[in-house]
Image (cartoon, grey):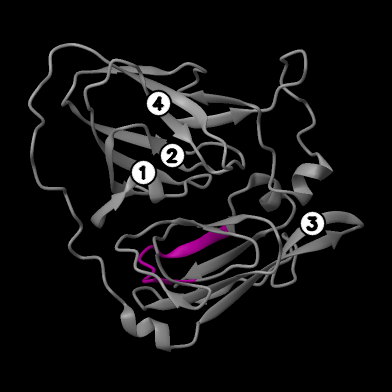
């Protein structure tokens, strides 16, 4: 469980939870990191041991890009669903709300191995793995792949059923965030038919980060900046970088009214939220 905390010079929790700076930037980012509530999370493993490690980004706004020092690390699950084929662990960007399961093979090491975050370009230690004990034979087995992930290659040539433009706005003179020019609770709900394919387009008309999250449904990224993307897995949150356009495909399977919003909580609170209905 990854989290970050913003502490003041007296090491107390910084109390301004509605700072204009956080709203107009990438949310509230902390200066202290915890894993499972600890600032010094340490695991112990034997050389050759194979570990399934689940990583959940519970931070309010911070983005992580986990790296695994000297370990063979492969992602086998994203956002709680098995992947269609294994993914190199160091290539995945973990936005708030994202979850990954990582298959780790522990090498021999006389010094502690580190799990670090490299998203900002600085290597920040998140946890340590101490390698000790007699070596064990590494278990060998097939990955539990999801063989039903669709290709949806023909979706690249069709128009989006719905476009969401993400932009800065003003609400009663205060900084705000809008979807298609409307600041929540003002919004237009979009209607999807149960079991029918939908192509959704997100356009980030800002210079900030926006991890967009759909409640109740899973989707597959089809393109980034109108270039095809091969993601052989489903997810429920995807990060848009400044100025980026992303297209996703989904078949809504759960009926009801669902939220769609930025997973940076300050952005959602400042209006970057809407809903869609699956009928």
Magenta region: 247-260
Is the Cβ of the residue at disc 1 closer than 8 Å to that at disc 2? yes
Picture coordinates of residue 9 (x, y %)? Answer: 77, 17
Q: Which residue is mark 2?
A: 66
Classify the position of the C terminus by image quarter. Answer: bottom left
Query: Could you tell me how far apart the alpha carbons at marks 4 and 2 are, in whole angstroms?
Result: 10 Å
Along the polypeptide, which appears first: circle 4 or circle 2? Answer: 2
Label 1 – label 2 distance at C-alpha: 10 Å
Which residue is tagged 1? 100
Quadrant in the picture for residue 202: bottom right
Q: Looking at the picture, tell me which residue is in the foreground, 196 or 262.
A: 262
Q: Residues within 10 Å of mark 2 (few under 14, many from 20)?
A: many
Q: Which residue is mark 4?
A: 114
Q: Is residue 251 magenta?
A: yes
User: Which quadrant of the figure has residue 107?
Assistant: top left
Image height of 126 relative to 250, above or below: above
Mark 4 or 1, nearer chain start:
1
Which label is found at residue 176? 3
First along the sequence among labels 3 and 4: 4
Q: Earlier in the sequence, mark 2 or mark 3?
A: 2
Other-residue count near label 3 (Cα within 10 Å), few / some / many at <14 / 14–19 / ≥20: many
């Amino acid at each position: 469980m990854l989290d970050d905390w913003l502490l003041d010079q007296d090491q107390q929790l910084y109390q301004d939870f509605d700072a204009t700076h956080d709203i107009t930037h990438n949310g509230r980012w902390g200066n202290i990191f915890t894993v499972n509530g600890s600032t010094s999370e340490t695991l112990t493993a034997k050389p050759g041991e194979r570990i399934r490690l689940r990583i959940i980004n519970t931070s309010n706004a911070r983005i992580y890009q986990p790296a695994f020092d000297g370990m063979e690390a492969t992602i086998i699950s994203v956002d709680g669903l098995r992947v269609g084929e294994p993914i190199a662990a160091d290539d995945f960007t973990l936005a708030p709300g994202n979850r990954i399961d990582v298959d780790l093979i522990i090498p021999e090491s006389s010094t502690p191995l580190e799990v670090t975050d490299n998203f900002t370009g600085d290597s920040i230690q998140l946890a340590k793995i101490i390698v000790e004990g007699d070596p064990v034979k590494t278990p060998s087995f097939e990955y539990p792949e999801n063989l039903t992930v669709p290709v949806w290659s023909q979706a690249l040539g069709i128009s989006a059923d719905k476009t969401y433009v993400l932009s800065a706005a003003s609400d009663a003179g205060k900084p705000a965030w809008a979807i298609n020019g409307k600041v929540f609770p003002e919004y237009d709900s979009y209607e999807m038919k149960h079991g029918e394919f939908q192509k959704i387009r997100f356009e980030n008309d800002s210079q900030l980060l926006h991890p967009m999250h759909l409640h109740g449904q899973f989707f597959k990224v089809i393109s980034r900046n109108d270039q095809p993307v091969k993601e052989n897995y489903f997810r429920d949150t995807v990060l848009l970088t400044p100025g980026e356009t992303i297209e996703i495909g989904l078949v809504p399977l759960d009926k009801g009214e669902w939220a769609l919003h930025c997973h940076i909580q300050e952005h959602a609170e400042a209006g970057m939220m809407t809903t869609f209905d699956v009928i």
